[in-house]
Image (cartoon, rainbow, N blue to C red):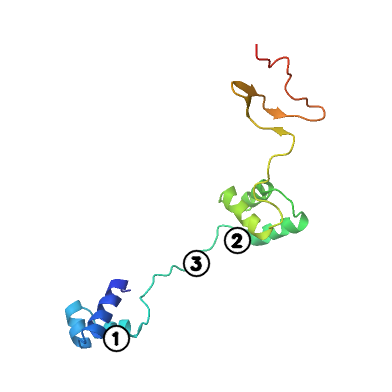
Amino acid sequence: MHQVDDWAEVHRLFDREGRPKAAIARQLAMSRNTVDRLLRLTEPPRYERPPKGSQLDPFAGTIAALLAADPRVPATVICERLRADGYRGGITILKDHLSSIRPGVPRRPGLPADVVSAGRDRPGRLVAHGRVGPGRPGPDPARHSDS
């Protein structure tokens, strides 16, 4: 396939300089048929790659069946079942696919409300990590004093 610069040069020589097709073919070392074909193109030639399938395509039926049984089944469970059937792809591809076919379920759900984030509550004092809530008290203020 010829490049965009071939198309542009053929059109420049023919349209602007008024050169004959045979002379253009000789000058650019290409066939007269190629010159004709390039002149018939109204736009420059483009490279188009044919769409390549996904690693998940062979498992679309299995994924659909698992989601029909339980729409909120986790991606990790689906991945385990697919691996048993021969799936060799990664979990990220699967998660992206699942987010496109079940848009109501977020791809990366946020942390539960009872998770304490890591950080400092004031300069120089570290805040404890972990969960707080019923049965799980937060950090003991007596243990974390500024003494």
Identify the secondary structure beneath mark 2. Answer: helix
Q: For residue 123, which numbered disc appears in the image?
A: none
Q: Give the residue type at disc 2.
A: Pro
Instruction: Locate the N terminus by quadrant.
Output: bottom left
Q: CA distance from mark 2 to mark 1?
A: 44 Å
Task: Using the image as rendered, state which of residue 42 and residue 33 is in the foreground.
Answer: 42
Considering only order in the chain, which callout, 1 or 3, is on the residue closer to the N terminus? Answer: 1
Q: CA distance from mark 3 to mark 2?
A: 16 Å
Identify the secondary structure beneath mark 1. Answer: helix
Identify the secondary structure beneath mark 3. Answer: loop
Find residue 28 and report its horizontal and vertical position in percent.
20, 77
Considering only order in the chain, which callout, 2 or 3, is on the residue closer to the N terminus? Answer: 3
| Neighbourhood count class around disc 3 (C-alpha, 10 Å): few under 14, some 14–19, many 20 upward | few
Residue 86 visible? The answer is: no
Q: For residue 51, which numbered disc appears in the image?
A: 3
Circle 2 sits on which residue?
58
Q: Residue furthest front?
A: 122
Find residue 76 and report its horizontal and vertical position in percent.
66, 46
3 vs 1, front mark: 1
Q: For residue 36, which numbered disc appears in the image?
A: 1
